[in-house]
Amino acid sequence: MKMDHAMRRAMEQGMFRLHYQPQISLANGQLVGVEALIRWLDGELGNVSPVLFIPLAEESGFIITIGTWVLKEAVRQAVLWQNAGTPVTVSVNVSALQFQQTDFVEIVANVLKDSGLAPYLLELELTETILVRDANETLNRLHALAALGVALSIDDFGTGYSSLAYLKKFPISKLKIDRSFVMGLPDDEGDRAIVSATIGMARGLKLKVVAEGVETIAQRDYLAGLNCESFQGFLCSPGLPAEEFERLMASFP
Ligand code: G
Ligand code: G
Ligand code: MN
Ligand code: NA
């Protein structure tokens, strides 16, 4: 496969980077964490969007290599921030194939151990697709990850079909409301119902909530009114290279 060859070459040549997008508290405007987002600036192809290459990497299995690189790189950066006295929780996207590796927990444990990062400064973003597969094995793996001290969140919440019973059972600490539901706020009645129900349910289950894709002040204010903990989105910042993110961070309360 042509794209697969290009991805392997890009990995060998070090053409992947991580950008970091802030998550901001709706109560006090403080930084609560960052999401690591992969970027590929290729010498020949230019910027290749993850919307394009992540699905292909998932098909070919190369996502395992990419995912392990992302994990190590995010942890390397998190250690730099930790040791500089400005600790930030870094969230990493985990693909289904990656999570299903039999040695996934061991990989995470080793990366953490080798790095010296306080485990709570790493968060793994899982999708509902991961969580509905093979419930028992999944549950064991989630408990093993939680036992390492890493935080677990559900990404794109509401777009999959995880049952509410799972939410109660799984050792997760956070829901990320998918941006497709945030987009229509505050005008769309359906989006208002879904978002406020999700936040209410999360509160009952003692889960934190991040609203994704917040682009307007009206969206932010509506979410703040529902006592949603935090938001992520272009209203604050897109994903930024580490150095630019640090400059932004320096301007935070
Ligand atoms: O950052 P952007 O909006 O371009 O990302 C597009 C998609 O790619 C999103 O669905 C996002 O979750 C996914 N993505 C970005 N970075 C990573 C990553 O490091 N690993 C995985 N598996 N997906 C990622
Ligand atoms: O699937 P996931 O939630 O990981 O996707 C994250 C993606 O969403 C990132 O690629 C990021 O670039 C994108 N994103 C982040 N904030 C916004 C936003 O405010 N608007 C839009 N349209 N996309 C966003
Ligand atoms: Mn994500
Ligand atoms: Na999402």
Image (cartoon, rainbow, N blue to C red):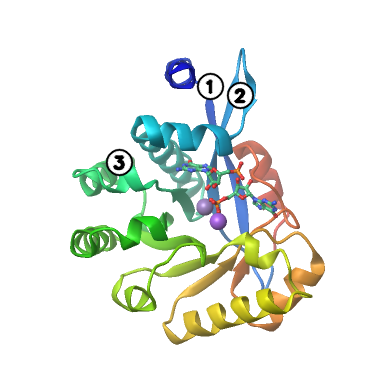
Residue in front for this viewpoint, 95 or 108: 95
Q: Where is residue 76 in the image (x, y as percent from the top left)?
A: 43, 38
Q: Mark 1 points at which residue?
A: 15
The reply to whether residue 157 is visible in this rendering is yes
The N terminus, quarter of image: top left
Tell me if 44 is positioned left or right of 188 in this view.
left
Task: Kindly identify which numbered label has been placed on residue 41.
Answer: 2
Q: Tag 3: residue type?
A: Val
Q: Position of residue 21 (x, y in %)?
A: 61, 49
Question: Does 180 sit above or below residue 234?
Answer: below
Q: Where is residue 84 in the image (x, y as percent from the top left)?
A: 51, 46
Residue in front for this viewpoint, 253 or 76: 76
Give residue 229's quadrant in the image.
bottom right
Q: At numbered mark 2, what does the secondary structure look like: helix, strand or loop?
A: strand
The reply to whether dot 2 and dot 1 touch (C-beta < 8 Å) is: yes
Q: Position of residue 196 (x, y in %)?
A: 61, 81
The reply to whether residue 27 is visible in this rendering is no
Question: Does 23 sit above or below residue 202?
Answer: above
Q: Tag 2: residue type?
A: Leu
Does mark 3's beta carbon lie closer than 8 Å to ligand 1?
Answer: no
Q: Mark 3 points at which residue?
A: 111
The residue shown at (39%, 46%) is 95
